[in-house]
Amino acid sequence: MDKLKAMRYFCRIEESGSFSGAARLESVPVSTLSRSIQALELELGAELLKRSTRHLVLTEIGQIYLDQCKDILAAIDRADGQVGSYQSSPSGVLRISALPLYADVRLLPILDELQEAYPEIIIDLDYSNQVTDLSRDGIDIAIRGGRVPDERVIAQYIDDNTPLLCASKQYLKEYGVPQTVADLSKHKALLYRAPGKVLNWLVESEGTWSPVDIQTALISNGGRMLQEALISGKGMALFPRWCMEEALESGNVEIVSLPENISNATNPATGIYLLYQRPQYVIPKIKVAVDFLRARLKAA
């Protein structure tokens, strides 16, 4: 039995939901897959799949084994890719996952330049706020906000992500400039909805965070929508400087300074990081992209 092939077949079956679907993806007879999985289960001494005429489900141990198989096969694919790409020119699909608003404001304006410099690179851009396992999700480069990530990836700091209290001149003229957090009770907030929860505003006092008393004008997970609502005077917002640079320079938006520390998280995301795996840096498409983005985005 070719165990690695059996593991790939097993992953394909879970992916497609059936033996016939997996057989089509692998261009082999269904009988070949069936014999391979049976041999794998026999060697492991465990049932990985429960089969019926209509349903195909993983057993509990089958789910555990599937997760391990995916990790092993991903590592093998990465190793093969490194060997095949080490001496070649930058080419192939480059998967980048970035915070949606950061991608729109900072990344998109320079991606054309990257592709002009390396025309054989195909960019696959994923907009995501979710924490990403680069290895498992097949991501080459990720851009995320947060504190310094763990040691499993290289984390290059590229921008400050401290939330600042902002408002348009039009809004401040109509509602007045707040002097303390207590004044915010007479104002309106534009709130960001992150995956799983709305990021309500908080004020820090002696190490304790408490809710800010302020009316809600709008809630959205769309950074662009909140940005436009801020500029048009619909409310105040907590935004990092990188996403409001143009509006601040034009004078349409101002930063409002308060004596209290206002945030939308008790553990504020203080940085934007460019993330990549150290072993992957030898692959030409990843190396040139990391170097390009690091140079263009850092302290932009």
Image (cartoon, helix red, strand yellow):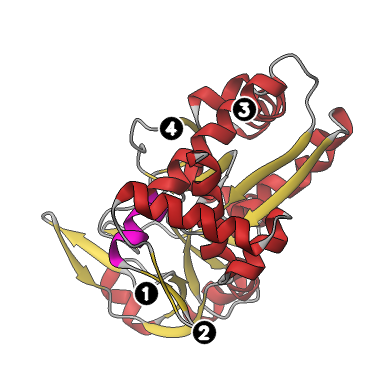
Residue 153: which numbered mark, if any? 4
Badge 2 element: loop
Badge 4 element: loop
Residue 218, image x and y in percent?
A: 51, 83
Determine the residue positioned at 33% across, 53% down: 268
Badge 3 element: helix
Please tell me whether residue 25 belongs to the stretch shown in magenta: no
Residue 87 as seen in the image, left or right of residue 60: right
| Among numbered discs 3 and 2, the one appearing first in the sequence | 2
Amino acid marked by disc 3: Asp
Quadrant of residue 299 within the rendered picture: top right
Tell me, yes or no, if residue 246 can be seen here.
Answer: no
| Among numbered discs 1 and 2, the one appearing first in the sequence | 2
Region rendered in magenta: 60-67
Label 4 vs label 3: CA separation? 20 Å
Front-most of residues 276 and 8 = 8
Residue at which label 2 appears: 53
Residue 77 as seen in the image, left or right of residue 203: right
| Among numbered discs 1 and 4, the one appearing first in the sequence | 4
**Comparing marks 1 and 3, which lies closer to the viewer?**
3
Badge 1 element: strand
Amino acid marked by disc 1: Lys
Determine the residue positioned at 52% across, 52% down: 36
Residue at which label 3 appears: 80
**Comparing marks 4 and 2, which lies closer to the viewer?**
2
Quadrant of residue 111 within the rendered picture: top right
